[in-house]
Structure formats: C-alpha cells, structure tokens
Amino acid sequence: MTRISSDDAAADHVVTDAGPPARIAAKKRGASKPKLEATQADAQTANLTSGAPTGAPARRPGRPTGAARGPEQRARLLDAALTLFARQGIVETSLGEIAREAGFTPAMVHYYFKTRDQLLDVLIDECFAPLRASLGLPFRENPDDPVAAITQFTERLVQVASDNPWFASLWIREVISDGGLLRQRMHERFGFAHQKESLLAIARWQKEGRLNASLEPALVFVTLLGMTILPLATSKLWRNDPLRRNIGGAEIARHAVALLVQGIGPAKGA
C-alpha cells in the first residue's frame, strides 16, 4: 500500500504548447518528367496538403521526417509521459512505453530525449516550475488578507487539476506518496524556500490576529490539498453515483474554502 507523507506544502504541471502546423512541400520535378506523371504528383501533393486520402499507405510510426519534425511532436511525447506517469508512476515508466503511448517508435522518443531523467527535467523546467510559481502568487498578492490568499490558492489549484486530467493522480502518486520521484527531484532543484515562505506568512497572520491561532501552519496546505486533489483524483468513481456525479471542480473548491473559513458550525446569521 502506498504511504502518504504530510510534509509537502504545494503541488507542482505542465503546459505544452503545440508548434505551428507542419507544412508539406513537394520536391521540384525536372522538365524531363512526362506531363501525366507531373500532374499526378501535383494532385497527390494537393491531397496531402488538404488532408484528403491519397491511397498511399500511412507512414509507420517512428522518427519524424522533414516538416513533420517539430514542437508538436515533442509536445505529444511530453503529454504521453504525463499520462503514463500519472497512471503507473515515473519509476515504472520506460521511454519505450512513452513512445508507444504517443504512437511513435522508441527511436522517435530518443531523438528528443536521451533518457527518462532528461525528459523529467524538461517537464520540471517547462511545466511544474511555472505551475509552482503560479500557485504561490495568491500569497504574494494578498500579504494582509489570509482568507483571500487561501481562497484564491484553492480555486487556482482546483482549476489546474480540472484543466489537466493527469494532474491529481500524478500529484498523489509522485508528490505526497512515500518515495515519489517527482517530489524528490523538485526538492533537489528548488529546496524548501517556497514552502517556508508560505508557512511564515501563515504564522505572521496568526500573530496579527488575522488567522485562527489554533491552526497548525504546517498542516494548512496538507489539509487544503487533501480536500481538493483527493476528491478530484477519485471523481471518476462517482460517474454512476447519483449523489455525487454532478460534483465538479467549482463545488470542490467552494466546499474546501467553506470548511476552512467557516468550519462546521452554523453559518453566521442562521
């Protein structure tokens, strides 16, 4: 059974931008070619450009050729890696499996990423690091309003997880689980400065009387993440549950904030 640790303050994703569409260019043909052959070649080129079938066999998966090689192919591999990392874990996922998930041969993935560690470093740099910084913004933008900071953090976290189906499962498997490789690599790269900054803000708010003094600062984020990411990660189990199947990200975020801000007592004025 996977053991869950409770010393992590925030989760870390990825957004990959697809590049411009590939352009298909026909080679110039010499004047010595028969007119009929040239006409057929031009028609085939037009069909390729428009996406119409040509009757030729589809190209087998593998290393991209010509204009087919580009950012969109790399992004496709990164998306496949994220899907598999969330489904079965980083350690259990090979480059060959990532290639198959993306519809390519192993040679294709090796063209872009020599090792799985290199691919993971790219995900951290291009995806998880920007996300990590984004999740810290509410605390920097609301230095004197803990309710606004925590509310915005919760809403932003739920939105990220809702926009990226792999996020919640990956976070549970690789960030809060004992021995999660992503958590280890993130800490090696960035340390605990981000976490300490947030915890100091919570402690300051408590001293200033802006936040409940009975709260344990080190558990605030663990509590928040448990009330948001865990429900999102298990939401697939609710599809046939008439009581919960209509619950989405907005409802989960509202529920989490209400519990933190108002607790379980009756609402004021009730």
Image (cartoon, rainbow, N blue to C red):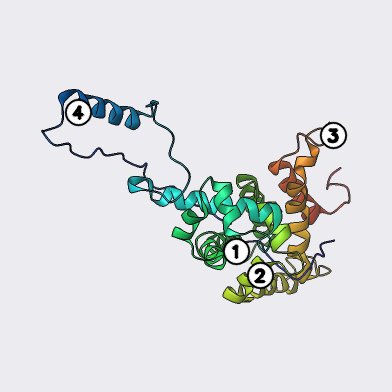
Per the image, the residue denoted by label 4 is 38
| Of pointers 4 and 2, the one earlier in the residue sequence | 4
| Of pointers 2 and 3, the one earlier in the residue sequence | 2
- Amino acid carrying mark 1 in the image: Gly
User: How far across and down, in percent of the image, does residue 27 sit?
Assistant: 22, 40
Per the image, the residue denoted by label 3 is 243
Per the image, the residue denoted by label 2 is 198
Contact (CB < 8 A) between labels 4 and 3?
no
Q: In which quadrant is the N terminus drawn?
A: bottom right
- Amino acid carrying mark 3 in the image: Leu
Element class at badge 1: helix
Disc 4 or disc 2, which is closer to the eye? Answer: 4
Between marks 4 and 3, how big is the CA–CA gap? 65 Å
Element class at badge 3: loop
Disc 1 or disc 3, which is closer to the eye? Answer: 3
User: How far across and down, in percent of the image, does residue 26 sit?
Assistant: 25, 37
- The residue positioned 38% from the left and 29% from the top of the image is 51
Between marks 4 and 2, how big is the CA–CA gap? 68 Å
- Amino acid carrying mark 2 in the image: Ser
